[in-house]
Image: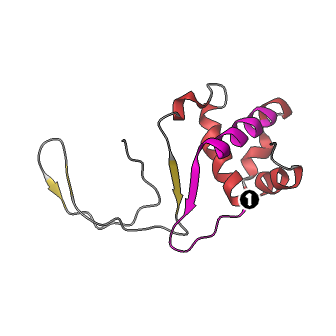
Amino acid sequence: ARVPDGVWREAVRAVPFLGRLDSAAQARLRELATVFLYEKDLHGAGGLELDATMRLTVAAQACLPVLNLGLDYYRDWITVVVYPDEFVPPGDYTDDAGVVHYRRAPLTGEAWLR
């Protein structure tokens, strides 16, 4: 099902640079974002409730880098977790050289490979 016009307009209003795309690019982005929302699980963390506009703005921003490439680049993605604010991930990690890092800095995002 296509994203409703009102939700699309709200998403473009929430992310102003989307409105700078020409109409053909916006149509492609809207279609990709619709498929993205169908194929991926989006979850709010920390009590964040994702409404339709929030889900679409996340999907549209995720699809923008692959607008002319297609969603195959995201075929290994399963879940997108949206935090209401920056967060401090638990645990330490060891880099490729075997050095253990004790980072306690807040993050605004991260990605994991499966």
Q: What colour-coding does the image apply?
A: secondary structure
In this picture, residue 106 sits left or right of residue 65: left
Q: Measuring 13% from the left and 42% from the top, which residue is drawn there?
A: 97
Magenta range = 26-51
Extreme-top residue of the structure: 69
Q: To which residue does mark 1 refer?
A: 52
In this picture, residue 15 sits left or right of residue 76: right
Label 1 residue SS? helix
Q: Magenta stretch: residue 76 in it?
A: no
The quadrant holding residue 23 is top right
Q: Nearer the viewer, residue 112 or 18?
A: 112
| Depicted 95 relative to depicted 49: above or below | above
**Quick one: quadrant of the C terminus?**
top left
Q: Position of residue 3 (x, y in %)?
A: 80, 47
Q: Measuring 55% from the left and 74% from the top, which residue is drawn there?
A: 47
Q: Position of residue 91 (x, y in %)?
A: 25, 64
Q: Position of residue 109 (x, y in %)?
A: 46, 56
Q: Amino acid at mark 1?
A: Ala
Q: Measuring 63% from the left and 52% from the top, which residue is drawn there?
A: 58
| Depicted 54 relative to depicted 68: above or below | below
Extreme-bottom residue of the structure: 47
What is the crowding at mark 1: few (fewer than 14 residues within 10 Å), some, or many (at least 20)? Answer: some
Q: Measuring 78% from the left and 51% from the top, which residue is drawn there?
A: 12
Extreme-left residue of the structure: 98
Q: Nearer the viewer, residue 31 or 88?
A: 31
Q: Magenta stretch: residue 31 in it?
A: yes
**Quick one: quadrant of the N terminus?**
top right
Q: Nearer the viewer, residue 79 or 25?
A: 79
